[in-house]
Amino acid sequence: MSQPMGARPSSGGPRSLMGPDTLPETSALPPGTIPRVIALFKPHKVGLSIVSAIVIISGALSILTPLLIRNLIDKALFPASELPNIDLLWKISLELVGLTILGALLGLWQTYLTAGIGQAVLRDLRTKLFDHLQSLSLKFFTGTRTGEIQSRLQNDVGGLQTVVSDTAATYVSNVVVLISTVIAMVILSWQLTVVSLIILPVFIWLTSVVGKYRRRVSAATQVSLADMSAITEESLSVSGVLLAKSNGQQAGASDGYRKQSSILARLQVKQQIVGRGFFIVVSSFFSVLPVAVFIVTGYVNTGGIVITAGTILAFTGLQTRLFFPLGQLLQSTTEISSSLALFNRIFD
């Protein structure tokens, strides 16, 4: 492994020369980053296999629910005989309750496994990074600020916790749910499915743009955190305090810290705005889509093909099951994209 962090002179001021609105010029990742990330998960193949099985089973169960709802509406509550079929109503209702309970238990088990695997990966990553730092020569430590070293070990690794413990598993789960939901939608009505899927290219493009920008913001934020750690270490150590008091530099040190803190605050606001703004646009758009389903249903029924009330109700529910995971999937994509910047800093 190469040095986990580049050596930088400690004699100058804060390393970052970026203004508050300046981001790294490129978001490209070194070719070896993703294989090295995958290698971190290899010791946990068994656990990952179990999680994958749970995700597939959960996806299969998600197909059954809307189909049962359609039968409950069209055959149990409002059958052709006009009188509710109570026996069938109870049967379908109990099946729906059973599926809900089973899905909740599987979700709980999945969370337990993914959290355990994620924490184990972070533990191994911290330990390997710490051991590697101890093996480096004294020249590395004299040329690198202590605060920056601590930032790599604490801030960068800590910033991966959510992604490693939750986001990656959620991403895979949402992919399975997305595929199974599309299958169920086609079974209910291929015409309505076409209308619902027509917006996918737009969101794929939007995800790509947002992901690249958010990764740049994430990289700049971690650099700013490292700068703040270095300034704190240099200014508040015994030698730093003595030097500042001897030369009357307390005001200058405070001013430098204040400027770096302002840069960090603006970068973190950018992170929040990009993520939240993207989510608002997606959720607002998805809220309007059921209207398109109602309009298309009217035209289809006029043409002689009957789409029942149960089908419409089940389909609009599936739209939520499609677009909510899709929204999460797009959000997870930006989070994973951002996390690659942290992995890149750690492996650097």
Image: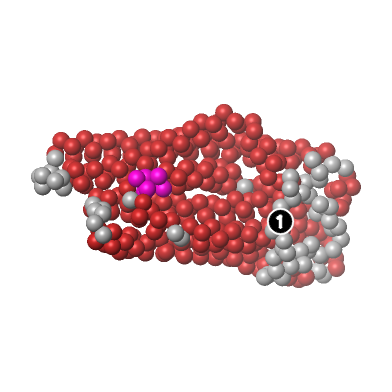
Q: What residue is shown at x 67% (from left), y 42% (from top)? A: 37
145 to 37, vertically: above or below: below
| Residue beneath the point at 66% across and 46% down | 157
What segment carries the magenta color? 181-187
Q: Quadrant of residue 245?
A: bottom right
| Residue pointed to by mark 1 | 28
Outermost right residue: 139
Residue 222: image location, x then y, percent: 68, 57
**Farthest residue toward the top?**
46
Compared across the picture, whether 52 is left or right of 216 comes to left
Q: Is there any visible trace of residue 151 in the rendered image?
A: no
Q: Quadrant of the N terminus?
A: top right
Q: Is residue 186 magenta?
A: yes
- State the SS at label 1: loop
Q: How is the image coloured?
A: secondary structure
Residue at the front extreme of this rendering = 303
Q: Amino acid at mark 1?
A: Ala
Residue 128 located within the stretch drawn in magenta = no
**Residue situated in front as seen by the camera: 61 or 9:** 61
Q: Quadrant of residue 303?
A: bottom left
Kindly identify the residue that appears in the image at 84 percent across and 52 percent down: 7
Instruction: Provide residue 279's location: percent of width, then percent of height.
Output: 48, 61
Q: Is residue 83 above or below residue 9?
A: above
The kind of secondary structure the magenta stretch mainly shows is: helix
User: How many neighbours does mark 1 have within 10 angstroms: few (below 14), some (14-19), or many (20 or more)?
Assistant: few
User: Where residue 287 sits in the image (x, y, percent)?
Assistant: 37, 62
Please give the name of the residue rendered at 57% of the width and 28% of the height, measured from the top-left corner.
46
Tell which of 213 and 315 is nearer to you: 315
The picture places residue 27, in percent across and down from the top left corner, at 69, 58
Using the rendered image of the protein, determine whether residue 282 is visible from the camera's viewpoint.
Answer: yes
